[in-house]
Amino acid sequence: MDKIDGATITATFATRRDADLVIERLVQEERIERTNIFDAALGDENSAGFRASGADVESGHAGVKAGGSPALADGITISVDMMDTAKLPTVRAVFEEMGGGT
């Protein structure tokens, strides 16, 4: 699920939406400083993840043809520098709940 390197915990998410929700939850609910959270696309091809979701999926709204095929490649990695290692189990639980893996 996650990789711990010193005081940093890292997980990879299938979609940009999942990664963004993890960041939002860690900042707003768990009170982890945003400056201690880092996100990055694993590959050079895109930053949307490897599974379509959210804005990547065309819904067929009026005037918009459904059936787009977003360019998807690698996952989105979230790393958290743990200044307070007591919160490590909490961060790990958020990662797991939101589908984080390696």
Image (cartoon, grey):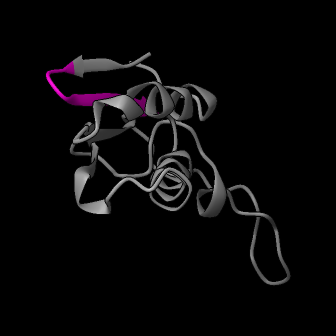
Where residue 29 sits in the image (x, y, percent)? 56, 55
Frontmost residue, 34 versus 62? 34
* Relative depth, front residue between 68 and 30: 30
Q: Position of residue 6 (x, y in %)?
A: 14, 22
Residue placed most toward the observer, 25 or 78: 25
50 sits to left or right of 7: right
What residue is shown at x 82% (from left), y 68% (from top)? 60
Looking at the image, residue 38 sits to the left or right of residue 101; the answer is left
- What's the residue at 45%, 34% (across, down)? 91
In the image, taking residue 61 as reference, residue 81 lies left or right, namely: left
Q: Is residue 56 above or below residue 10?
A: below
Residue 69 location (% of width, % of height): 58, 50
Residue extending furthest toward the bottom: 63
On whether residue 88 falls in the magenta region, the answer is: no
Q: Quadrant of the N terminus?
A: top left
Instruction: Tally the numbered discs.
Output: 0
- Screen quadrant of the C terminus: top left
In the rendered image, residue 9 lying in the magenta stretch gets the answer: yes
Picture quarter containing residue 5? top left
Q: Residue 74, located in which quarter of the rendered image?
A: top left
Q: Residue at x 63, y 30 (%)?
A: 97
**Residue 31 position within the rendered picture, expressed as x and y whole percent measured from the top left:** 44, 56
Of helix, strand and loop, which mostly describes the magenta segment? Answer: strand
In the displayed orientation, state which residue is furthest to the right: 62
- Chain part drawn in magenta: 5-13
